[in-house]
Image (cartoon, rainbow, N blue to C red):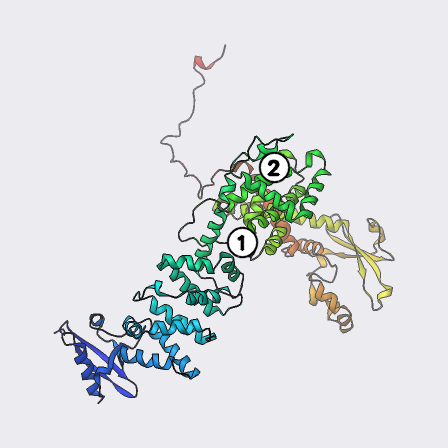
Amino acid sequence: MPPPSDIVKVAIEWPGANAQLIEIDQKKPLSSIVREVCDGWSLSGAEQFALRYADGPQLYITEQSRCDIKNGTILRLAISPARAARQLLERIQSHGIDARLEALKELAKLSADPTFAAEFITMEGIGTLARLVESGTHFGEMLAFTLTAFLELMDHGIVSWDLLSLSFIKQIAGYVNQPMVDVSILQRSLAILESMVLNSHSLYHRVAQEITVGQLIGHLQVGNRPIKAEMAHQLYVLQVLTFNLLEERMMTKMDPNDQNHVNPATDFTQTPPGMLALDNMLYLAKLHQDTYIRIVLENSSREDKHECPFGRCAIELTRMLCEILQVGELPNEGCNDYHPMFFTHDRAWEEFFCVCIQLLNKTWKEMRATAEDFNKVMQVVREQITRALAMKPASLDQLKSKLRSLSYSEILRLRQTERMSQDDFQSPPIIELRERIQPEILELIKQQRLNRLCEGSCFRKLGNRRRQEKFWFCRLSLNHKVLHYGDLDESPQGEVPFELLSDKIHVSDVKSVVTGKDCPHMKEKSALKQNKVRCQAVSCLFSLVLYCIWTDGLCALLGREMSSDLTRSDLDTLINMEMKLRLLDLENITIPEAPPPVPKEPSSYNFTYNYTTSQDYFV
């Protein structure tokens, strides 16, 4: 028979005593249950005790929360919330630093309990903590625990935030304004200021007078603090709102009625980017005068068709940057895509433009662009910027470094690599095509290696005395059956005739090709000592030659696999080129995963046609 629903079986602990296993009757007053527990351990003054959870937040159990107790829960007998609050308040006000620190540690932990918080606040505990902060005598751990306890107590909503004094607000703001304040103190101070702003309209204006955005951004430039998801989202929102301040200039047109001989005002009548483009150009000319002069002089000295139009580039680049950074758009909920480098400079937007306009000028030169190539250049620059931003550079200097590595040639290489790694190139038909092409390409590489062997190569002949080194030359006969070689006094300037090569080796007599440390001459002690460094530096050192082409060629002659790195590189390059040529006509066409089904067999194979009828003849 199951136990009644109002009976809960629990274990209750007390330091230095065996736990009590009791049944709590939920119909009885909680004070009666506490008295029974105290009687079990012969403890007097039951009204000074209460029950708490032994695990988790260890909250006090009240008449309102006792219904949450489950069977098997472990509870703990503790001093009552009122008694605990009184004792902690006395210890906090004592003169002993160690005792005060331990009391503040315990208070920071207990303040999350609403029952304890209510008792502590009733005893004017919040006022005591506020005065400790206002005094400015607490530092380090003691201050951190004080702020933690204060924030936990205020979060219960028992006391109004409007009651805080201006002195307290200034002290908390002072911690935030310190450039190298302890992280724990900074976090708690920021949390207190945030609660002030969210819970009181009057405090919002007071906090705004003490704290500026620039002072807050200074803390973001410290790189040793972990950025969690919520913080990242807030930084993203701050970044979006900061860039949205540019929207007014971005949507402002220049007055076309300005009196100019050649009216440039018409260049800034389109929005976006409006007057924002002109602002960027002026910033570059004033704050980075050397860069501005260099860009202008470089383009004035080029041929007319290769001149990079500075004004047009600045306008289009500004529009592009507004699109990339979504200037004027509202922040998205749950998004945390922020860029750390925009928090490292007071004029981050303008500096970002200055970096990108230099990139545009550099890319224009690399592409040898003309006016007709303007849109192509802008596409490449957009890709360079987006790829660099995706790497999340921590500063503008890091952005410059990443952009330098993303040259036009590198962009082309990345595009090619990404195209080859697309799903189409991993589909079964493409893989099957590669497998069919590979033997043909390998045969082509083999023929190239053998042709190279037939041309021959000259090698240094190492002796015991390096000054007396001579040369020797080796060639493969045109019928691929004999290796001809011989000594030479000096390196030849061209092809050496077979008649001058007195020695020869029949390919049929070659049993194997030995490379590296397995070479016979490398095993000789004297040679090993002399050639130790050379052997470590060259991976294809073998008895006859020192080149991958020869190792491949000899392996091909012996009917073995050409396994050098050069062969693998050549194979990959040639297959990729062949694949691109064969797939040119399939651009933007989806390649099916499986071949089309074979149609059913016809019901009859009688496909003959009678040509003897009169109508089949032509007159």
**Does 168 appear above or below 16?**
above
Horizontal arrangement in the rendering, residue 10 relative to residue 481 (left or right): left
Would you name the residue on which mark 1 appears? 342
Q: Residue at x 35, y 81 (%)?
A: 90
> Which disc, if any, is residue 379?
none
Q: Residue at x 49, y 56 (%)?
A: 213
Q: In terms of secondary structure, where does tag 2 sit? A: helix
Give the class, few, some or many, for how many residues have Cα within 10 Å of label 1's Cα (few <14, many ≥20). many
**Does 109 appear above or below 447?**
below
**Residue in the foreground of this view, choosing between 449 and 296:** 296
Classify residue 15 by image quadrant. bottom left
Q: In terms of secondary structure, where does tag 1 sit? A: helix
Tell me the quarter of the image containing the N terminus.
Answer: bottom left
Horizontal arrangement in the rendering, residue 106 relative to residue 556 (left or right): left
> Which disc, if any, is residue 312?
2
Horizontal arrangement in the rendering, residue 37 relative to residue 407 (left or right): left
**Does 432 appear above or below 169?**
above
Classify residue 229 by image quadrant. bottom left
Q: Which amino acid lies under the numbered mark 2 shown in the image of this protein?
A: Arg
Q: Which amino acid lies under the numbered mark 1 shown in the image of this protein?
A: Phe
Q: Residue at x 40, y 57 (%)?
A: 204
**Residue in the foreground of this view, choosing between 226 and 130:** 130
Residue 577, image x and y in percent? 60, 43
Residue 132 visible somewhere in the drawing:
yes
